[in-house]
């Protein structure tokens, strides 16, 4: 377990009144875990545009050279944009980039017109490796440090969650629906607090993600939940069922933004009161010690 955990929002769709940050549709979190006086530092996702991420990191005093690893929550361009440039900026060789093996598949929508939504040209496997990255691709929970790991793939249990029928991929030349099999989160175990769960867009569903976390660490309380809930176009029924599911896990705090959508943020505030915090660039969370 970690003695303490610090999370800083590096990229998000909005900024607060403080700081000189750049906001863009995308998400990136800085994660710092401390154990026995030693620090581990990683990123979950890198947003969409490397120059904007680099700007926000400079403003926050976080140097890319100090980062030990990056986890990519799923293939979307607003989470993986500029990953090769970020890896290059660390100046490291064999820099760990952790993701699902399906990350680099073709991934696109056809509404309103065909458009690629997955990993962009310039961020493909070879570009990441040329920049000094070492891809560690696994569908299983991946250990990042003591008390810090990915969730691995998320079983789709709830029935009401999932990405719907908007996304497509190619399999043996055939166009088939894409269920975002690569969607995953990061979970931290903090001494005296419990579990902190970080999600990208929650395309597999935040309730499914929390069920996965509970199955991995049975009996441990959920302290915090962060990320995008992808309910920006969610139906009333889906939002209400998600709220009911979240309440069952009874997190001490919940911080959502990005693709969560204002109606769901509003419902989260009505349900959880001050336990809910909207995400903005620069928003910092400290857990434990
Ligand atoms: Fe997203
Ligand atoms: Fe996404």
Image (cartoon, rainbow, N blue to C red):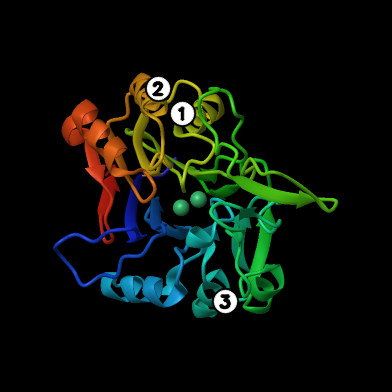
Q: Name, please, the residue furthest toward the front.
A: 112
Check contact, mark 2 vs mark 1: CB within 8 A: yes
Crowding at dot 3, Cα within 10 Å, few <14 / some 14-19 / many 20+, comes out as some
Crowding at dot 1, Cα within 10 Å, few <14 / some 14-19 / many 20+, comes out as many
Relative height, residue 249 to residue 32 (above, below): above
Q: Is residue 287 left or right of residue 89?
A: left
Q: x, y percentage for residue 158?
A: 53, 22
Q: Is residue 94 visible?
A: no
Q: Quadrant of the C terminus?
A: top left
Q: Is residue 241 left or right of residue 214?
A: left
Q: Name, please, the residue furthest toward the left.
A: 17
Q: Quadrant of residue 2?
A: top left
Which residue does the numbered mark 3 point to in the structure image? 92
Relative height, residue 71 to residue 192 (above, below): below
Q: CA distance from mark 3 to mark 1?
A: 36 Å
Which label was assigned to residue 241?
A: 2
Between 268 and 89, the one nearer to me in the picture: 268
Q: Mark 2 or mark 1, which is nearer to you?
A: 2
Q: Quadrant of the N terminus?
A: top left
Q: Secondary structure at mark 3?
A: loop
Looking at marks 3 and 1 on the same chain, the residue that comes earlier in the sequence is marked by 3
Check contact, mark 2 vs mark 3: CB within 8 A: no
Q: Secondary structure at mark 2?
A: helix
Which residue does the numbered mark 1 point to in the structure image? 207
Between 262 and 188, the one nearer to me in the picture: 262
Q: Is residue 106 visible?
A: yes
Q: Mark 3 or mark 1, which is nearer to you?
A: 1
Looking at marks 2 and 3 on the same chain, the residue that comes earlier in the sequence is marked by 3
On whether ligand 1 comes within 8 Å of the CB at mark 3, the answer is no
Q: x, y percentage for residue 232?
A: 38, 43
């Amino acid at each position: 377990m970690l003695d303490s955990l610090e999370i800083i929002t590096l990229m998000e769709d909005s900024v607060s009144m403080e700081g000189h940050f750049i906001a863009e549709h995308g998400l990136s979190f800085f994660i710092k875990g401390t154990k026995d006086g030693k620090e581990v530092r990683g990123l979950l996702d890198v947003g969409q545009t490397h120059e904007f991420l680099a700007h926000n990191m400079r403003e926050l005093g976080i140097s890319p050279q100090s980062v030990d690893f990056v986890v990519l929550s799923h293939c979307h361009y607003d989470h993986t944009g500029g990953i090769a440039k970020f890896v290059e900026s660390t100046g490291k060789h064999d820099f760990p980039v952790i993701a699902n093996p399906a990350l680099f598949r073709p991934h696109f929508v056809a509404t309103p017109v065909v458009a690629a939504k997955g990993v962009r040209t310039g961020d493909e496997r070879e570009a990441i490796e040329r920049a000094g990255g070492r891809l560690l691709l696994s569908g299983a929970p991946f250990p990042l440090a003591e008390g810090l790991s990915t969730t691995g793939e998320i079983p789709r249990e709830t029935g009401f969650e999932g990405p719907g029928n908007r996304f497509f991929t190619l399999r043996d030349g055939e166009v088939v629906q894409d269920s975002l099999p690569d969607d995953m989160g990061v979970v931290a175990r903090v001494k005296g607090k419990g579990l902190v769960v970080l999600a990208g867009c929650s395309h597999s569903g935040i309730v499914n993600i929390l069920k996965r976390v509970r199955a991995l660490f049975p009996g441990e309380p959920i302290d915090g939940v962060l990320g995008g809930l992808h309910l920006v176009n969610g139906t009333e029924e889906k939002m209400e069922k998600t709220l009911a599911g979240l309440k069952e896990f009874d997190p001490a705090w919940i911080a959502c933004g990005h693709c969560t959508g204002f109606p769901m943020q509003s419902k989260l505030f009505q349900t959880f009161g001050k336990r809910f915090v909207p995400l903005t660039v620069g928003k910092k969370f400290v857990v434990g010690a």
